[in-house]
Amino acid sequence: MISRNRASYDCTAFTYANILADKASKLGDKVFLTYLQDNRRFSYAEMDVLSNRLANGFLARGIGKGAHVSMLMQNSPEQVLTYFALGKIGAVVVPINTAVRGAFLEYYLGNSDSVALVVDQEFLDGFLSIEKDALLADVIVFSSEGRAVLPNSDRTIRFCDFRALQNADGKPPGIDVSFSDTAALMYTSGTTGPSKGNIFSQIHSLNFATPLIEALDYNADDIYHIALPLFHVASFNHALLVMLIVDGSVALAKRLSVSQFWEEVSSSGATRSMMMSIGGFLLQQPPSPHERSHRLRTATAVPMMADAQKFEDRFGVRLTQAYGLTDCCLPLSQSLSDPPSKRFSIGRAMPGCQVRLVDDFDRDVALGSIGEIIIRKDDMPFAVAGGYYKMPEATLAAIRNLWFHTGDRGRQDEDGYFYFVDRKKDAIRRHGENISTFEVEALIAGHPAVADVAAYPINSSAGEDDVAISIVIDSGKTLTEKDLFEYCRLHMPHYMVPRYIDIRAELPRTSTQKVRKQELRDYIEANAAAVWDCERHQLSTRRASQASAPRTAQPFQSITPDQETPV
């Protein structure tokens, strides 16, 4: 059914039901997934039957083809089965970042038109605290401890234990699902507006990263170590589904731990992993007996770390880099045959993808010049994201002249390799997340003492961005940086919380009243030591607390990969 030769792919075969049934019949007892948290193992045949049970359980509750189902879950086999089960019945899964809370959670549930929510027990209180239920009729609660604790709620919502759905029949649900049917709404950061739900067809969801199969020589002997969260395409569509396609296996961690990374990789026999931007954290760790006693061949690092050679020499792992967007596809990647001199490129165009660099009028720029990266994919129908859900204007703005406009700028060398330069659009990349400055500004503007606000990126030593804000305090009111920081912590996902807070009398603006963010950015970068910095604040707070009461609970600390999944 699935060939390594993309020209021979049968596009109609790309549905969750078809792929899983085919793999189960051919591979049977081969282990597909090992959960490192409790060492549970699931064969291909078990994943097929268990997802059938869950699919039939959804159908029994009236959740069927076309229903939008949000999912607020950490990495677990049950999360993977939920993806598979909803795909088999033609329902539309809406994965939500587990750091999302409050108004952001309300927005995702409402904007996606979700009629049901599958939620881990530990995130249920966060859902119950929001004021609006949108269209929700069902909330299905999963507890890793056994029976879920369901709330006594006066809301007109049916609460159910996840495990009850797993008692349904294990036969295929028998729903007619096409490769072109919508499988998921994958949300990504907005820039001048709220986050947008990208429409993923069944074939696009399953085919998102298959161009990497040949470039990186993925094969049936591979075991992919996945510690980054499955609610993102990088882990689910890139890593897990590619292993499904090539008959490989997955070693799944509940969350990322830098201190346990090499032990997990070594004990699981993993041959592949995805590190995104954590390579620098790994280099800072003391030597480990596991850091060379492993089978790891390659690891994806985005962006490529400056100390890439040092990393490869120390750990014996080849670092690779690719370029992809939830909004479109994965058009560029390095390959294992690329020379070291191309290490900091984002690779060449993948089979079936066309990539150009253009000016503001979509005219090609000269070789070596900087232009916006635009993409077109032509090898399969429905094999790119189908636009933004309920946002036709945003869809048309992105897909102009029959090309998808990324809003990113790059250049190309004489050998056909592309290099990322910067972002043309007003967005921030932090801890693997695309952050909408619009959403940051909208939430901070809701503080009663804030009269004006601008959010913008600052270069980070970790290779991505830090979030900075400049604010104007309303006349007659008072607000300290610390108070605003605590407000942000309470109402924002952790990755959005600003590091730098700059209070000023007014924001610099152009003649058309647009904020001159570059001027603000230049000021922060030139005067970082004088601007309020949450990392310095937390360090001084922690030292004072330890000095006065060394045995008390520690105050809030900066997010590190061992404390909170960064992506």
Image (cartoon, rainbow, N blue to C red):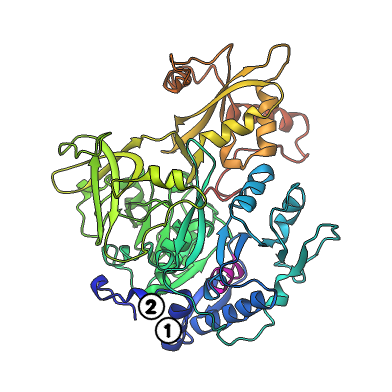
Depth order, front residue of 181/100 = 181
Give the residue at the far left of this rendering.
414
Reply yes or no: does residue 328 show up in magenta: no
Q: Position of residue 111 (x, y in %)?
A: 60, 50
* Residue 498 in the image: above or below residue 202: above
Residues at circles 2 and 1 in contact by the CB criterion of under 8 Å: yes
| The image quarter in which residue 543 lies | top right
Residue visible at 76% across and 46% down in the picture = 131
Query: Is residue 372 something one can see in this rendering?
Result: yes
The mark total stands at 2
Residue 13 has which mark?
A: 2
To which quarter of the image does residue 394 belong?
A: top left
Secondary structure under the numbered disc 1 in the rendered image: helix
- Overall secondary structure of the magenta stretch? helix
Does 49 sit above or below residue 281?
below
Q: Which residue is mark 1?
A: 22
x, y (%) of residue 403? Answer: 30, 49
User: Mark 2 vs mark 1: which is more N-terminal?
Assistant: 2
Magenta segment boundaries in residue numbering: 76-85
Amino acid carrying mark 1 in the image: Asp
